[in-house]
Image: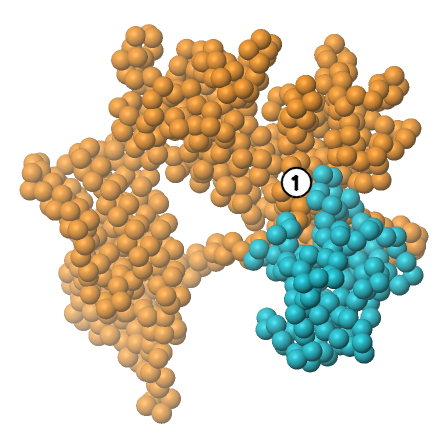
Amino acid sequence: MNPAAQSFVQESRDILEDLEGILLELEADPANPKRIDAVFRALHTLKGSGAMFGFATLSAFTHHFENAYDRIRDGQAMVTPELIQLSLASRDHLERMLDAGPDTDGAPASDPATEELVARIEALETGAAAPTGTAPETERFVITFQPDAAALKNGMRPDLIIEELAELGEATVLTQAEDVPGLRDLDPTVCHLSWQVDLKTAAGREAIDDVFIFASDWTLRIEQPGAAADGAPTESAGDLHDSQASDAATPAQAAPQDSRVAQKTDSVRVQSHRLDELMDQLGELVIAQARLNRIADDLGDTGLDSTAEEIERLVTGLRDTTLSIRMLPIELVFGKFRRVVRDLSTELGKTVTLETRGGETEVDKNVIDSLTEPMVHIIRNSIDHGIETPEGRRAAGKPEQSRVIMRARQSGGEVLISVTDDGRGLDAEAIRTRGIERGLIMADQDISEDQLFGLIFEPGFSTAQSLSSVSGRGVGMDAVRRVLDDLRGSVEVKSQKGSGTEVTLRLPLTLAIIDGLLVKVGDNPFVLPLSNVEECVELPPDENTRKSGRSLLRIRDQLVPFLSLDALFGFDRVESPVRRVVITSVEGRRTGLVVDEVIGQYQTVIKPLSLYHRGIEGLAGSTILGDGSVALILDAAAVVRRAQGAQKAAA
Amino acid sequence: MDETAALQTALTFSLDGERFAIPVAHVNEIIDPLPITRAPNADPFAPGLVNVRGAIAPFVDLRRRLGMAPADLGETSRVLVLDLVIDGEPTKVAMLADDVDEITDAAASDLEAVPELGVRWPTHLIRGVARQDDALIILLDVDAAFAPTPS
């Protein structure tokens, strides 16, 4: 695909994404003319630009889709639930057409899926009633535009732009050829022409803007002569021949002037792998800088010291800026779920409203990318298992309409994302029975409710009586935990029988850098994610001598199990006078990890492990310390799980 | 890589008194021994990690795979930093050699099949043997010899 077509595909995806949101809003508020206009404009843009970039099939299909909304706009039809349903299906179909790429021969192809949708759209049209509506007023615009030098090379078609403008209403087109050079200097691949279109249309200014949406590099001026006075269209023929006329009118018409050229510098589209590369290089820089600091310390040269400090300051600033570039609002994930919730509740015959809060909370792009899958599993579980049928809810004395709330908030270096439903809650007894059946817990085991709920994240664990297409196969919640592990996050469940369930995901703000606690086990440095560390305490001397792998420690009236990392790692015990217990908190449970020395807090760049070490449970990555040695980053959740596994095996 | 072409320029090194060769195209650099960070619960074949000029590389113990006894560092011990492709991922791997000898241009015709008997190590790790001045050079099969899990 050429770059222009690629950018069309990318922008069209954005349009389709917006379109989904608009359609869902329109469903809630079917008479809103602004939303109807917005749908129409989106479709119109797709149709026009699709044709321009060789997506003929897409363009032809959109034409039918657009017609349906044109009729609504004209007041000949109404927005109905069927129309919304069909529109969403058509929107999905357009997405597939974008995936399929441009038509090779430039002619619209046809396939059964397209034809079926077209037939359904047309059936809707003929069946619709025709209430009367008021036709919008016609306005006059003078549009002057000149394609940029590379436009023709990129496959842009000014003729199609003109055609599209003409479709909006009554247009008079004037070609301006003053800038065409002599034949000797003429570069046939450069567009030397510019055009002025005098347009009378009811479609409004935004429709005109949309025609030029993929032509953002062009010089464009849209004016509304006599917009204020609304009554001087007399010299229409005369001024077309005078290219000065519109220029002369410019100063007086400052307000409606288009400032596209200035606008487009607001944001830049960057391929995400470039951000990854930037982050990689920054990681190297942070490590090199730590080395520089150490050398400066050793040499004790004041000039070098102050330079090293300055570089440290600059690197920190650069790191913060780079990280902020990678941050995206979590609304990007939430937004996808409006549709998921709607479709699921329709399929399962339940009425569910989705509320989102804190969508503006920002998370690293890589976290965002990995978040959709676990969220889908959680939402599906909520709606399928958690939320009762309308009859069930009535019987339980609850409102028929159920609510699912997605919340996000930042807390320290973590982002907490929770999904709350007001359904029937988890059945602790059923989970206990199933847990015993599967040998995960002992029949007589005294286990807290939180720990019991944790079992739903075990592979293949499902208490569902029946399978549905949606969930109940016992895959899903273990996938949630797996993804969260990969993201160095954790997941917690709270549930109240009869009144609902809350699943909370804790995620690091970024995957590239970690705030850690540097410790030593023997001579080997390890980094524990600070987000898992609650406190460090001294190891009581009598405990130190005990050889057993795991014991209990009393911390402020609470017994906390602890275990020795050297035993867990199979390292030889090194006698250390400064052995400490690092109290970690993982998924709401506290566990102490005995280390030989706590060195301090350490912010570090995470390097992924090679294939030789990736499979080792409990390791999250590696990093280089200021002295050049390699430290391993621990995955506290996996370490604790491994320890519990070892404990169970021993018992 | 073409087997015969690879043989033409190979780096030879010693392990436990034997001479081994690997195609020079895989050798990134030869450096002095480095401190190794032990990876807990790791396969003894890849017991740790090292910092090679700011890049973290797994450290592998070829002696272990070849069934040789562990040895201490000597005067001539060197670390070979290799550029390998492990399961499709370009990976920098460090290994210790007792000594690094030379870069040799053995002719392809010198390569002999591995004798079935009289070889101390698993034959699937070896591509062939070559004779040079009556000494035997063992050409390693890089993919098998450095695979993260033994085949």
Q: Colour of chain B?
A: cyan
Q: Residue furthest front?
A: B117
Q: Is residue A420 left or right of residue A155?
A: right
Q: Amino acid at mark 1?
A: Ile
Task: Pick whichever, A559 or B62, lies toward us.
Answer: B62
Q: Is residue A176 above or below residue A102?
A: below
- Residue placed at 17% from the left, 51% from the top? A112
Chain of the residue displaying label 1: A
Q: Position of residue A38 (x, y in %)?
A: 27, 45
Helix, strand or loop for disc 1: loop
In this view, A287 is above or below A73: below
Out of A347 and A14, give the one closest to the viewer. Answer: A347
Quadrant assignment, res A518: top right
Q: Quadrant of the C terminus of chain A?
A: top right
Rendered residue at 68%/26% (across/down): A646
The picture places residue A500, in percent across and down from the top left corner, at 43, 16
**Residue nearest the observer in this picture, B144 or A583:** B144
Apparent colour of chain A: orange
- Answer whether residue A409 is visible to the viewer in this image: no
Dot 1 alpha-carbon crowd within 10 angstroms: few under 14, some 14 to 19, many 20 or more: some
Quarter location, residue A413: top right
x, y (%) of residue A509? Answer: 59, 38
A346 left or right, relative to B18 = left
Left or right of A628 on screen, residue A452: left
As drawn, A273 above or below A238: above
